Amino acid sequence: MENLDDMLGKLSDFLKSEAKTETIIGQQFQLGEFTCVPVMSVGLGLGSGGGEGKGKGKGPGDTKGAGEGEGFGALGAAGVGMGPVGFLVTRGETIEFIPARSSKGLSALLEKAPDIMGKIFDKTREKEAAHA
């Protein structure tokens, strides 16, 4: 039981240090007039199992349960996964969420980001020029 308490204590310490707002909501950065904030997801999985047994052999040919004695076994496992969800993008009073997951994955989005932002900048300039 001490090992389980030890493991849970270490897991709690890890979660306190790693799964915090600064990790889930990344550091903001500027992209022209836009402020971008990456958003992450965090997943946690836990599992455990155990068992015990006693062996009492009936004779030389009987291997099932052969031998005298007792045994106990236990196992515990944990996994933590983190991944990007998208970006919160702000410009002035406007806030928009751009998802990072698409049918082609995050890499396709990151490859298209400069073109998308360029098109947004061009449209903004056209609107400002039309109102001037």
Image (cartoon, rainbow, N blue to C red):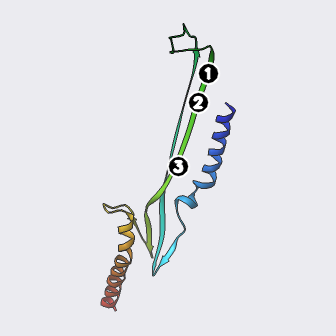
For badge 3, the amino acid type reads: Val
Residue at the image point whose x is 54% and y is 7% from the top: 59
Q: Is residue 25 left or right of residue 122?
A: right
- Look at the numbered disc 2 and give the secondary structure of its residue: strand
Residue at the image point whose x is 57% and y is 33% from the top: 75
- The local crowd at label 2, few if under 14, some if 14 to 19, many if 20 or more residues have their Cα within 10 Å, is few
Q: Are marks 3 and 1 in contact (CB under 8 Å)?
A: no
Q: Residue 84: x percent and y percent?
A: 45, 60
Q: Is residue 99 visible?
A: no
| Mark closest to the chain's N terminus, 2 or 3 | 2
> Which label was assigned to residue 117?
none
* Quarter of the N terminus within the rendering: top right
Residue at the image point whose x is 60% and y is 50% from the top: 15
| Mark closest to the chain's N terminus, 3 or 1 | 1
Q: Residue 28: x percent and y percent?
A: 52, 70
Task: Place residue 126 in its image quadrant.
Answer: bottom left
> Which label was assigned to residue 80?
3
Residue highlighted by disc 2: 74
Residue at the image point whose x is 35% and y is 83% from the top: 124
Q: Is residue 116 left or right of residue 87?
A: left
* Quarter of the C terminus within the rendering: bottom left
Residue highlighted by disc 1: 71
Q: Residue furthest right?
A: 2
